[in-house]
Structure formats: structure tokens, C-alpha cells
Amino acid sequence: MDTILEVSNLNKKFTGFSLNNVSFSLREGCITGFIGINGSGKTTTIKSILGLILKDAGSIKFLGEEITDHERELKNRIGVVLDEGYFYEEMTLKEMKNVIAPAYTNWDEPVFLSYMKRFNLKLNQKISTLSKGMRMKYAIALAISHHADLLIMDEPTSGLDPLVRSELMSILLEFMKEDGKSVFFSTHITSDLDKIADMLILIDNGNILFNEEKDQLLESHAIVKGDHKLLNEQTRQLFLTLHETTYGFEGITQDLQQVRQQLKDIVIERPSIEDIMLAHIGGPTHVI
Ligand SMILES: Nc1ncnc2c1ncn2[C@@H]1O[C@H](COP(=O)(O)OP(=O)(O)OP(=O)(O)O)[C@@H](O)[C@H]1O
């Protein structure tokens, strides 16, 4: 599968926070979830990719070309949905569209109008009167009406109810039906990714901790529960995180084969993406 976007050694320093040699690549035809807790660096990474903040160092290649060298041409092929919708509140949806559309050479008005209809959005409605869900749908309609190959979204599901979140997931899956499309979206609501993500990238404190296929990640990790007596210095090493009480333990392992060999009478369960994320950043898993 071809690489659509390649981020190499991206560095950005703020007082008290830095992106440290952030490197990852996005594959064509994949939905990639960019996960991490609040303040881990997701927005900073996305804004650096889009040139909305100036990176200190690093390279960002879109389809093999340095993005800053062919900015206008390459950005024509990227659709963007940002956390703070960069809209003028007093404008109507039509007026705002008239500001945005000319920036894209491939703008497709009939496609835009079909999304408006489908999302039940009125062109003469003011931006300020949109609910959060409607605002998100409007932002998506604007982002995908110029035949973008890559859709980049920063926390698109934040603040949305489960119904709208699930609608959004369906829209993304539909967008992916056409050949050569890719989606990169950041979220801390990892349950949104259970059904739709192909790849997962975890960032923590400005460092990439993993960039792997979702199914592979779910298969290579397991929740293990057992009697406290099974734990010793050696068996403890088999776990990424471990919660112990006087009665039992619960841990997440990446080495199930060794766990099965060394620990008997254990219960093994499938972890969620959230369990895996928290295990890698050293946060709490379940409370026993
Ligand atoms: N312009 C800025 N100046 C100084 N610090 C900043 C600036 N922008 C972001 N930061 C800091 O960088 C860190 C990472 O922020 P960022 O918004 O990238 O995290 P995030 O993973 O997107 O978080 P969230 O999920 O809460 O949106 C935070 O500590 C934030 O305060």
C-alpha cells in the first residue's frame, strides 16, 4: 500500500511542551486514528502538518513531495476539519462557503449541495445558530466537496452525542469507498475507532509510542487476571501495567505466550483500544 503522508522527525517546542522527533506515515486507503490523552500533542502535530504553526524542524511529505514546496497544489488534495471551526459566526452557510470554495481548484458545487441536503443544512442559516453536530457536518461538507484525497480531522467527535458520532463514522466510511482516499483523525474518545480505524498512532507527551494496525494491536495485547500469589519479580516483567490487591491482580501484557507458560489458572480477556492506550502511557486500567 502506498504512503500518502510521511512525517519525519517533526520537532516543535513550546514553553513546557515539545514534539520530539515525531515520525509516522499514513497509508493510502486507510483510516488512521491519532490517539492520546489531553495535551499529548495531537493538535500541535496536525497544525504543524498543515503549516498552521511553524515547525522547528522535520519534514512533511504528501505523496512524496515536501508539503511546503508545493503548498497550494498539495493542499488542494487535503480536506481539513479542525477542532475550533474557523468560521465567521455572523455569516450564513452559503456566504461562508463562498469564502472557502475559491481556495480550491477542484471545488464541486453539486457535491457540496448534495451534502447540504443530506445533512439537512440550510444555506441561508447563520453559522452562529448551528448546533455542535450541525457545525461538524457543515465542516465535513466543506472539507470533502473538493475531491480531497486525504481528510485530516482534529477531534471531530469531541462534544458530540453518540448518535451524531455514529453518523460521522458512517460518513467517513462512505468517503473511503472511493479508491485512493485516506482519513487521519485525532481523538481521545477511542471507542469511536473500534469499528472504523485500520491503523492507530499513539502520541504521549510529544512522543510517538506506536504506529500499528488496529487488529494487530488488539491481537497482541491481552488483559490477564489471576491470583496475587502468581506474581513474582520475573512474572511481573511480563506486564505493561499491573494493578494488585491482596486478593488478585489485573494486568495488560504484550507477551501472552510467555504469560500462558509461566502463569496457571488465569483469566484472559480482550482489551479495548483505551486499555491498550492507557497501558502504554502508564495510566490506570480497570479498577479491581
Ligand atoms: N501556542 C502554544 N503556546 C504554548 N503552548 C502551547 C501552544 N499550543 C499548545 N501548547 C501546549 O502544547 C501541549 C500540547 O497541546 P495540544 O493541543 O497539541 O494537545 P492535544 O493532544 O491536541 O490535546 P487535546 O486532546 O486536549 O486537544 C499542551 O500542553 C498545550 O498547552
Image (cartoon, rainbow, N blue to C red):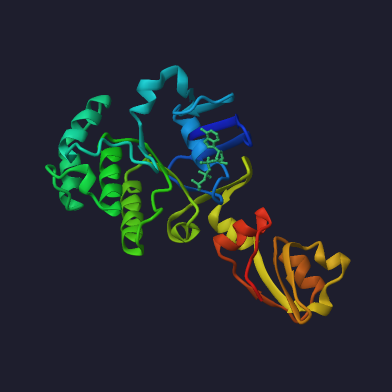
Quadrant of the image occupied by residue 220: bottom right
Instruction: Indicate the position of residue 12 as horizontal and vertical percent values.
Output: 59, 30
Instruction: Indicate the position of residue 108 as horizontal and vertical percent values.
Output: 20, 34
The residue located at (35%, 42%) in the rendering is 179
Quadrant showing the C terminus: bottom right
Quadrant of the image occupied by residue 147: top left
The residue located at (46%, 53%) in the rendering is 197
Instruction: Indicate the position of residue 91 as horizontal and vertical percent values.
Output: 19, 36
- Residue 103 vs residue 132, the one in the foreground: 132
Query: Does 278 appear above or below 68?
Result: below
Q: From the viewer's perspective, is 281 left or right of 258?
A: left
Q: From the viewer's perspective, is 121 left or right of 156?
A: left
Residue situated furthest top in the rendering: 69
Quadrant of the image occupied by residue 52: top left
Instruction: Indicate the position of residue 265 as horizontal and vertical percent values.
Output: 75, 82
Residue situated furthest right in the rendering: 233
- Residue 131 vs residue 10, the one in the foreground: 131
